[in-house]
Image (cartoon, rainbow, N blue to C red):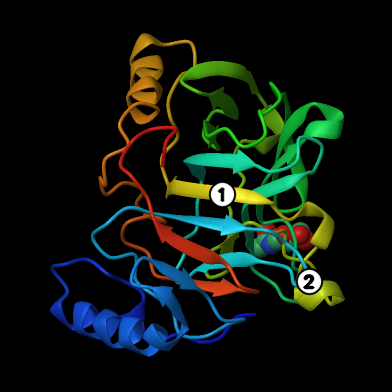
Amino acid sequence: MKNPTPASTTSCTPAAARSVLWCVFVVMLLGVQAVSAKKIVFPSSGNPTCPGNRLHKITLVQSNYVQYSEFVTPVPALRAVSTCFWMTVQDANRAATPLNYAVDEQDNTDNLTVQYRPSEGSWTLNINGVRVYTARAVPLTPQRWHHLCHSWDGATGQWSVWQDGSLMDSGVNTRSIGTEIPAGGTMVTGQHQNTLANMGMDAGEGLTGSLTLLHVSSTPLGNPQSYPTLRLVQHLATDCTATDRGDVVGWLRTPTRGYGGVLQEVAFQNCGRF
Ligand SMILES: *[C@@H]1O[C@H](CO)[C@@H](O)[C@H](O)[C@H]1NC(C)=O
């Protein structure tokens, strides 16, 4: 699962001319896999591909093979984390794992895991194998795009979960204070990394649906009760332009490696109608 990656493939910023050339090369290699100029069906694994300047979305169906997308980038140690993303689910009752990060292949599950568990009516965050929160979930409407944000601050223990620009749940987990998510692991979207079974993935927790504009930041969203935080999340939920965000993972910047036939398509920069 963790293939060493040349440094030149870990960034796609326009400033890094070498990376851009590499990206062009990778895109040419992937050209043979492309259904059309606008659609890429990733092979089971392969070279990382760069997001490019246009907004894209990915779709996972989890049939026959587990499907997920790996963010090919070095992940630093994190003492706080926030992630926002747009997601649709195909099936109202199926669990989904929009974000998972694992460090150790032998114990390869939960250094950071954000999961939607509709059967329990909850969103969960696990860090280093420990549950940080079980938040109330408002059910996602199948086939509809929803904007989600999750935030945890290891300095205060404060966490929050947002859906479509509104605060869904928040709290303080004092036991999580001082926890550090270790550096150097593998971050994926769409699946929960596990040891051995299903190519190291847990088939039952894989997303069937689509994702776009997924960003991961090393800073928390801020006090969930404060007006500036609400305004920030509302802004993120209504600005769907191809804007570079997320210092850990940037949807428009971080190269990905798709597994199992992940479909990548160009998306409209139009919230909820990608
Ligand atoms: C990573 O997560 C696993 C649980 O899946 C945990 O046992 C391990 O201690 C974590 N690593 C670190 C360095 O905290």
Q: Which mark is residue 64?
A: 2
Which residue corresponds to the image point at 31% horizontal and 46% vertical from the top-left? 245
- How many neighbours does mark 2 have within 10 angstroms: few (below 14), some (14-19), or many (20 or more)? few
- Work out whether mark 1 precedes mark 2 in sequence or the reverse, and give the earlier one: 2
- How many neighbours does mark 1 have within 10 angstroms: few (below 14), some (14-19), or many (20 or more)? many
Answer with the quadrant where ligand 1 appears in the image. Answer: bottom right
Q: Nearer the viewer, residue 9 or 50?
A: 50
Which residue corresponds to the image point at 52% horizontal and 49% vertical from the top-left? 211
Judging by the rendered image, the residue that carries numbered circle 1 is 210
Horizontally, is 65 left or right of 103 in the view? Answer: right
User: Considering only vertical position in the picture, is 250 above or below 156?
Assistant: below
Does dot 1 land on a helix, a strand or a loop? strand
Residue type beneath disc 1? Ser
**Percent position of residue 184, x then y:** 53, 70
Does dot 2 land on a helix, a strand or a loop? loop
Residue type beneath disc 2? Asn
Which residue corresponds to the image point at 54% horizontal and 68% vertical from the top-left? 70
**Percent position of residue 94, x then y:** 80, 43
User: Considering only vertical position in the picture, is 230 above or below 267?
Assistant: above
Distance of mark 1 from mark 2, alpha carbons? 17 Å
In which quadrant of the rendered view does residue 23 lie? bottom left
Q: Is mark 1 within 8 Å of ligand 1?
A: no
Asked if residue 177 can be seen in this view, the reply is yes
Q: Which mark is residue 84?
A: none
